[in-house]
Amino acid sequence: SVERSPDIQTVRLQLPVVAEEQKIMEAVHNSNLVVVYGATGSGKTTQVPQFLFEAGYGSLGSPTPGMIGVTQPRRVAAVSMAKRVGDEMGNQGKKVAYQIRFEGTVSQDTAIKFMTDGVLLREVAQDIALRKYSAIIIDEAHERSVNTDILIGMLSRVVKLRQEMAQEDQSTKPLKLIIMSATLRITDFTENTTLFSEPPPVLQAEGRQYPVTTHFSRRTNHDYVEEAFQKISKGHKKLPPGGILVFLTGQNEITQLSKKLKEAFRMGHTSTGPQVRISGKDAPIETEDIDFGDFGDDRNDDFDEDDEADIDVGEDEEFKLEGEEEETGPAKMHILPLYSLLPTKEQLRVFEPPPEGSRLVVLATNVAETSLTIPGIRYVFDCGRSKERKYDKNTGVQSFEISWISKASASQRAGRAGRTGPGHCYRLYSSAVYERDFEEFAEPEILRMPIEGVVLQLKSMNLQHVINFPFPTPPDRQSLASSEKLLTYLSAISPTGQITSTGATMSIFPLSPRFARILLVGHLHDCLPYTIALVAGLSAADIFIPSNQAIPQIAALEPDTYLTALDHAESERAAAIRRHFNAVQKSFCFLDSKSDAIKLLQVVGEFAHEPTETWCISHFICYAPISPLSQPWHIKINSHHRHRNR
Ligand code: ADP
Ligand code: MG
């Protein structure tokens, strides 16, 4: 039995999920499939695995000896949740382990195994019956990542298979599947009869643990990094003790803000640590692998303006917390970055207590949006945006765009302030923008991307008829059919739809099948470095600045218009730029005047030789290849606001 420390016991008993233990376990007992819904902080991730453990799952000698597998969308969540559950389980703590792409602590004694969804996907591919497990918990299913969706589809079949096996042979036990979600948007699972012929029972645990007060900004500043800097600086001086968690969209912003804060509060220099290398051949693909990080300064120069008056809130009012007359927090800041490309070890630093006399300030991307409980966080500053991969459905070219998060995400972010005590969430956008521009929920990732990568992944798991795969939200048949056609053309699958050895190799790359194929051909012809450069160029959005943007446009003049000296200078300047522009384009094409691919290769090669913004400017190449116009908060530009020039 589990002996927990009294402290842990007290905390556990307050969690809404714990009150539902009996109902949840009854449902698990009666049904192979159960959905658990509970608002963020209700105790799903930490408690449900322990309920299963205490009911005998994962224990040798019990009727259900297989491990309890728990999936997380992110590495840092898998590692930190394993640690937390281990701590909670006291004398049994050693039975909790994790497995992520390059490392793990799983042993023979492991009863509860936290892992990324990529790890479990790979295990399903190796053993479709998942014999090592007696129960699987798919956590954070509301995030609707492609991996989660595929896992749920696969597992619906694994559960059936195990049921059949158990009926034939008493020594095999059915597999229990528990899907956990922090939002009530679960009808894609519960009402999808292709996925589950009978609707699974839904167990609810209501109520967030601690109240979080939300504060909207009066107006929405387009420069949210600056806005965050201002607000955090003020907040740090005025607010009672408690950690600050800041949501930004990417590594560059984090580095930038970290530097500003450190300068303002006179501290040492920024260190964001080395980057994770992506190389493992035998490793599963995790969300982080397809996250290429930043493409430079990607902030937008356009304004969005609220319908509300343009009043700046006085700083005194803004951070005055009603009813709280506590002293302000410590004077020093302990600033830590948290983003997915940061090595897991570095990410885990946020869980350590800050040095005596300093306030913990975590600058994070949406890595910190779900799962994590960072002890002591009391204030959340949310920029309301996130960076998402966007694909051109026709070319498969991906870009990163910053857009508004959903209302569901905003509430997840706010929830991070109420994990270990009551908290406050400062939204760096107005309630008008929130109401008008935020979707209720984010669209499932699978509907936002070209499907051929997913099809290839399924084929690599020996699924021949992808059309029959029980997707929670199925992509349309037309695009499934055209993906198969493309994969056949790329020799990734045979004409009968089976994966080829080429296809199997291609499925290992965290790249679209087209690009994976290019790399393989490059390897075959011994020119891999060039093909890597080429794929790098192709997988970025449009990198060339078009001539009409590069060259100043001079209005055509009437024949006998009197030209001022200024007009002359202007048109001469334009002509000079045009000459330079043409010369540059020509030089890019000197190896081959007809091939766009060779031109692109030349650009990437030259840039690699001199990777500076200056080079880009003088060669009419976008340093930050993110189109400002496609950013959703480009709403309207008020005339009294000047445009900053890039
Ligand atoms: P859910 O998955 O429903 O969002 P969790 O099970 O992750 O909730 O966490 C429930 C609560 O347990 C948190 O709100 C927090 O109070 C406590 N908790 C979880 N992890 C930690 C931790 N590392 N340190 C302190 N408290 C924690
Ligand atoms: Mg959770």
Image (tube, rainbow, N blue to C red):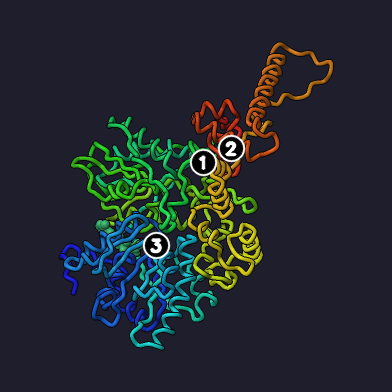
Image quadrant containing the N terminus: bottom left
Q: CA distance from mark 3 to mark 2?
A: 35 Å
Q: Are marks 1 and 3 in contact (CB under 8 Å)?
A: no
| Foreground of the two, 500 or 420 | 500
Whole-percent x, y for residue 408 in the image: 46, 58
At label 2, counting other C-alpha atoms closer than 10 Å, the crowd grade (few under 14, some 14-19, many 20 or more) is many
Any mark on residue 119, and which? Answer: 3
> Which kind of residue does numbered mark 2 sit on?
Leu
Name the residue tied to disc 2: 601
In percent of the image, x 49 and y 39: which residue is there?
295
Image depth: mark 1 or mark 3 in front: 1
In front: label 3 or label 2: 2
Residues tagged 3 and 2 counted as in contact (Cβ below 8 A) = no
Q: Quadrant of ligand 2?
A: bottom left
Identify the secondary structure beneath mark 1. Answer: helix
Quadrant of the image for the C terminus? top right
Query: Going from the N terminus, do you reach mark 3 or mark 2 first?
Result: 3
Res. 307 visible in picture:
no
Does the numbered disc 3 mark a residue whose Cβ is under 8 Å from ligand 2? no
Q: Is residue 360 visible?
A: yes
Q: What type is the residue that disc 1 sits on?
A: Pro
- Taking depth in this image into account, of 121 and 534 the one nearest to the observer is 534
Nearer to the camera, 285 or 402: 285
* In the image, residue 550 above or below residue 76: above
User: Residue at image x 39%, y 54%?
Assistant: 369
Q: Give the crowd class for mark 3: few <14, some 14-19, many >=20 residues within 10 Å.
A: many
Q: Earlier in the sequence, mark 1 or mark 3?
A: 3
Other residues around mark 1 within 10 Å, as few (<14) / some (14–19) / many (≥20): few
Whole-percent x, y for residue 313 in the image? 41, 39
On the image, which quarter does residue 479 sit in? bottom right
Indicate the secondary structure of the residue bearing disc 3.
helix
- Between the residue at mark 2 and the residue at mark 1, the CA separation in whole angstroms equals 10 Å
